[in-house]
Image: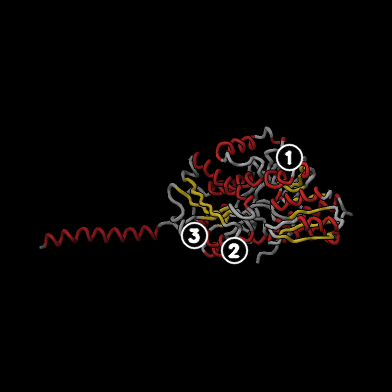
Amino acid sequence: MQTITKTRLIPAFFAFAAVVLASVLAISQPAWAAGVTDTEIRIGNIMPYTGPLAAFASIGRAEAAYFDMINERGGINGRKIRFISRDDSSNPRTAVEHTRELVEQERVHLMFGSFGTPSNLATRAYLNERNVPQLFVASGDEELAQPKRFPWTMGWQPTFRAEGRIYANYIQASYPSYKIAVLWQNDQFGRDLFRGLQEGLGITANMIVADIAIDADMSIDTQVEILKSSGAEVLVLNCAPPISARAIRRAAELGWHPVLLLVNAAASIANALRPAGLQNSVGVISTSYLKDASDTTWKEDPAIKAWLAFMDKYYPDGDKEDGYAIFGYAAAETLVQVLTQCGDDLSRENIMRQAASLKGYQSPVVLPGIAINTGPADFYPIEQMRLVQFDGSAWQPIGDVIESAFAARPSDN
């Protein structure tokens, strides 16, 4: 009987010891263990693959393709990226549901590059409460760069408000006596840029003789007719690519040829100008901070050659003239830079620390003279743009890189 008892006690003892050891090891594991292993980094993303803003889905597809390329090359410090992207159809409620699933079930280590102001604002509090990085969001809303209140959320692109001020400065310098009409998207994106335009015009804001707010999925033929009847000589299109395309085409059908200013978010040859009719889009003015692969200026540029080779191999179904694809490529490239800087310390705290310490980082596909800079109190990575004009086949620069037109940042309370 004693022998039997001892035989039973020995495995029981080791089982108990194993439980204790596992508990100790679990306690000693770094906080990032759930989303990072010796071989993998899990990254979550929300993107509108369907719905009225599906034109922007190529951002997410290009990011996924970029990470495929990085993984094929060995990953980041030996770890492969597992990029898990979910479709929210531009619905903030769906974005919240998917974000919770990504964090709590998929155990992603950080959220990266999620699209849209409403969806990112809807998920911001949840992610900050859980100390999950919400990095390089695909939105130019100033609210997504408030490090004191939301230290885990960082933007990437220039702000919409600043872009509006750039257009205002351009109009004042080139067409000071022209009447202005604005077609703007009735959401945070549209309001921010329109506010920047009004602020930039200052006392001459009364030159805006007509403005109409529209939803992202509505027909706008009548609205364009109303804006034409206002007598405006400048038309600012502050809306998504499909609506911008319809507005440019409708203006041409009406024989109305105002000075056309098209927001950067819609300045895609593939998704706006080509559907509008390239002949109707000649002369359209916008802003840019990324190289345009269709611009012959960059024909021999090593970065654009690398981009074209990337598209051929990793994203063959993508459109090389789709500005959103190169946006996703550049944003993913910036994240890889941050993760590389982290070395073997991939704690969430260090990821944010490295994201907030980019100094003069220049992505090869960002325009010359534009650098990415961040700091503990500066969550605006890109703060420079330049004006460009469409010549019928590509965007051509008009003027130098602009910094001084940017709006003063709101206080971060």
Query: Farthest residue toward the right?
Result: 177
Towards the viewer: 257 or 158 = 257
- Circle number at residue 394: 1
Towards the viewer: 219 or 239 = 219
Percent x, y of residue 174? 85, 49
* SS at mark 3 in the image: helix
According to the picture, the residue beneath numbered tag 3 turns out to be 101
Q: Is residue 397 above or below residue 91?
A: above
Q: Is residue 68 above or below residue 100?
A: above
Percent x, y of residue 167? 78, 53
- Circle number at residue 122: 2
Dot 2 surroundings within 10 Å: few (below 14), some, or many (20 or more)?
some
Dot 1 surroundings within 10 Å: few (below 14), some, or many (20 or more)?
some
Mark 3–mark 1 Cα distance, whole angstroms, equals 41 Å
Q: Quadrant of residue 134?
A: bottom right
Mark 2 or 3 closer to N-term? 3
Q: Residue at x 64, y 44 (%)?
A: 362
